[in-house]
Amino acid sequence: MEENNNDYENLLFYFAYKTFVNTADEIIEEYGLNRQHHRFLFFIEKAPGITIKDLLKSMEISKQGSHATLKKLKDEAFIIEKQTEADKRVKALYPTEKGTKLVHELNKAQNDLFRDIQKKVGNDWYAIMEAFASYRTGFQEVKYLKDDVKK
């Protein structure tokens, strides 16, 4: 069985992903936050009432790795923490109105970029990924690898 050279796909995904996340990173930095804050806030906003334990399990993050991020989100009033009814020792997380507004702003920026690209190139996944990747200067250096892809 012949093995495909997927270097192009790996790099394509990397550069496309970088464009996608940087769209939100640029906005969230204006709030003094970073990508980790965005991920936490996104999960909390999509699953209001999620326990800290379940959040960390879903995100595959250690408790130590979460403390500073959750503290900042609480201190800046993007989320609130409440005791659960079933067990007062367990803490559930909820987005505040401010937190929900920020998630919607970040999602809108990413969704708008995705829709703009789809309008330009259609629904072909390669074309979409290449359009995302084309925003990164490094992608131009590896575009030649596309010719090495065996279909």
Image (tube, grey):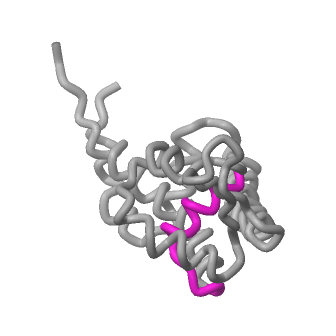
* The stretch drawn in magenta includes residue 49: no
| In-front residue for pair 6/149 | 6
State which quadrant residue 151 falls in.
Answer: top left
The question of residue 35 being in magenta is answered with yes
Question: Which SS type dominates the magenta stretch?
Answer: helix
Q: Who is closer to the viewer here, 20 or 90?
A: 90
- Residue at x 69% of width, y 49% of height: 49
Please tell me which residue lies in front, 74 or 131. Answer: 74
The answer to whether residue 146 is left or right of residue 97 is left
Q: Is residue 10 visible?
A: yes
Q: Would residue 139 be found to the left or right of residue 28 on screen?
A: left
Q: Decide if residue 121 is on the left or right side of residue 37.
A: right
Outermost top residue? 1
Q: Residue at x 61, y 36 (%)?
A: 124
Which residue range is magenta in the image? 30-46
Q: Position of residue 55 (x, y in %)?
A: 53, 49
On the image, the x and y values in percent for residue 114 come to 68, 53
Task: Please give left or right for residue 84 compared with residue 139 in the image.
Answer: right
- The answer to whether residue 107 is above or below residue 24 is above
